[in-house]
Amino acid sequence: ALAARAGLSVGRLKISVVTTAKYLIPNLLGEFCQAYPNIEPEFQVGNRAEIIQRLKQNLDDLYVFSNPPRELDITTDFITKNPLVVIAKQDHRLKDKQSILWSELHGERLLMREKGSGTRYAIEAFFRQNGMEMQSPITIASNEAIKESVMAGLGISIISQHALSHMALGNLIELPVKDFPIPNSWYWVLPKGKHVSNAAMAFREHVTKGLSSQIAK
Ligand code: PGA
């Protein structure tokens, strides 16, 4: 059935994803391009606010969000989990502690994504819901720059665990802070009623299959 669909799916596939999803989707894109040489994917990456703008203008065939804009008329389908974890430099003073309280980190500089970031949105909601206090953060508008800055000893941060998966081991550590990770997930998002192109459907199925085989490994 997939091959038959591939035959139909000639043309472009425009996908827009939030920045954390770039640790998820490109891994699976290579195989997809091999399986569907007729489909030409075009891949946009932006923060949540930017991808919301694209969604509102109906610019793409498919969207990936972690914190879908539920106030809009959309459909969402779960992809996989995207936990947000506390990270620190490898020689952090609490590196050997088994369980850390957030309050023990309160004196440290917190590096956070920019306003408009879904990661920041989820972190702020989590602190509000749990009545936890957050030090005033320093804003750094990129996951990569945050990782570099944490490694350089500028402070600690809270980022997608998947953003760590391609790092050289040992440069950064995840701190076992009580009540973390912050639960979060990725979703396929489309404006309600939008026709799902064959190419978009094939891509969704490919990603789902790829993820389940990764989990099985
Ligand atoms: P962001 O969104 O790139 O806007 O932080 C990612 C996410 O919500 O996981």
Image: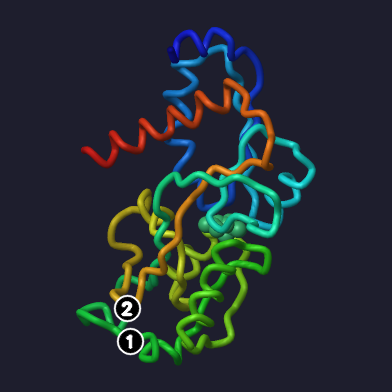
Residue 196 x, y percent position in the rendering: 62, 28
Q: Which residue is disc 2 drawn over?
A: 177
Front-lying residue, 45 or 179: 179
Q: Quadrant of residue 71?
A: bottom right
Number of other residues with Cα within 10 Å of mark 2, as a class: few under 14, some 14 to 19, many 20 or more: some
In the image, what residue type sits under mark 2?
Answer: Val
Above or below residue 216? Residue 142 is: below
* Quarter of the image that includes the N terminus: top left
Q: Which residue is disc 1 drawn over?
A: 101
Q: Residue at x 35, y 38 (%)?
A: 211
| Total numbered labels | 2
In the image, what residue type sits under mark 1?
Answer: Leu
* Quarter of the image that includes the C terminus: top left
As drawn, the label of residue 49 is none
Task: Tell me which label, 1 or 2, sits earlier in the chain.
Answer: 1
The answer to whether residue 144 shows anywhere in this view is: no
Local SS, label 2:
loop
Q: Residue at x 67, y 41 (%)?
A: 192
Q: How is the image coloured?
A: rainbow
